[in-house]
Image (cartoon, helix red, strand yellow):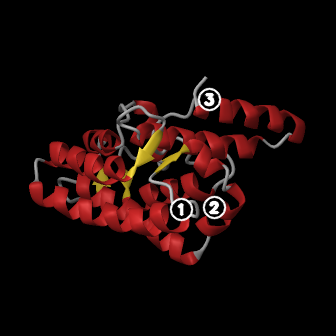
């Protein structure tokens, strides 16, 4: 059994006693995110996967070396601030879902800190701008599919509809930011599928 699966099994067992399904959702979100970013399949996300491999996917999607370099700088800054800074009390070189889940109380408190929320809005805005190829401040299905490809997630109409909260056939920048912030801080399923369907 993989570390991720065993961590979730332990959480589910604990939750059945505590009767707090929101904790399980939080763990499932992070397990899914780490899984999407884990290109080499070792159950962890390292700096190369987070920065270089993500930037390479951006280049493949946008066909722009300039955008690849821009996102690489942004991702390196994010890695240093969040993953290598705040999350890394143990000087880890890579992170498993268990590493994130084991710091839950500290991590959840940090996620509602104003500086972190600003970082999250910048994250959403940056990726939105990358895939909004027609520059109309809305993502159509093709552009949303490209966003999901950056995170190695297949497109589905259900994911698009969930993000398109006003059902106008496009995802606005504010809808994108609100869904991503909900993914980060909400205890429920709100925004849970931002980076792909949570199992």
Residue at figure coordinates x 62%, y 29% from the top left: 5
Residue underneath mark 1: 88
Residue underneath mark 3: 5
Q: Who is closer to the viewer here, 50 or 62?
A: 50
- Residue 45 seen from this side: yes
Residue at figure coordinates x 61%, y 39% from the top left: 28
Residue 22 placement: quadrant: top right
Q: How far apart, in angstroms, are the residues tagged by discs 2 and 3?
A: 21 Å
Residue at figure coordinates x 80%, y 31% from the top left: 13
Q: Nearer the viewer, mark 3 or mark 1?
A: 1
| Residue contact at pointers 3 and 1, CB within 8 angstroms | no
Placement of the C terminus among the 4 image quadrants = top right
Counting from the top left corner in percent of width and height, residue 42 is at 44, 34
Task: Name the disc covering residue 107, or none.
Answer: 2
Under circle 2, the secondary element is helix
Counting from the top left corner in percent of width and height, residue 27 is at 64, 43
Placement of the N terminus among the 4 image quadrants = top right
Under circle 1, the secondary element is loop
Give the vertical position of 79 relative to 167 (above or below). below
Counting from the top left corner in percent of width and height, residue 186 is at 64, 55
Instruction: Give the mark nearer the N terminus: 2 vs 1.
Output: 1
| Residue contact at pointers 2 and 3, CB within 8 angstroms | no
Under circle 3, the secondary element is helix
Residue 144 placement: quadrant: top left
Left or right, 8 with reference to 83: right
Give the vertical position of 59 relative to 13 (above or below). below
Q: Who is closer to the viewer here, 73 or 177?
A: 73
Give the vertical position of 79 relative to 153 (above or below). below
Task: Name the disc covering residue 126, or none.
Answer: none
């Amino acid at each position: 059994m993989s570390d991720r699966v065993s961590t979730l099994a332990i959480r589910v067992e604990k939750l059945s006693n505590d009767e707090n399904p929101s904790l399980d959702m939080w763990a499932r979100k992070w397990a899914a995110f780490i899984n999407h970013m884990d290109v080499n399949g070792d159950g962890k996300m390292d700096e190369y996967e987070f920065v270089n491999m993500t930037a390479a996917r951006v280049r493949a999607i946008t066909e722009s070396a300039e955008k690849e370099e821009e996102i690489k700088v942004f991702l390196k800054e994010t890695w240093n601030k969040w993953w290598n800074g705040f999350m890394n009390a143990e000087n880890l070189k890579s992170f498993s879902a268990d590493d994130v889940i084991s710091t839950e109380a500290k991590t959840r408190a940090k996620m509602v800190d104003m500086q972190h929320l600003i970082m999250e809005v910048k994250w959403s805005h940056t990726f939105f701008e990358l895939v909004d190829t027609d520059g109309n401040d809305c993502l159509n299905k093709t552009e949303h599919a490209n966003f999901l490809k950056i995170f190695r997630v297949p497109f589905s109409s259900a994911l698009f509809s969930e993000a398109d909260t006003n059902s106008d056939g496009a995802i606005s920048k504010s809808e994108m930011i609100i869904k991503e912030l909900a993914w980060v801080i909400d205890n429920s399923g709100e925004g849970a599928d931002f980076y792909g369907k949570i199992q």
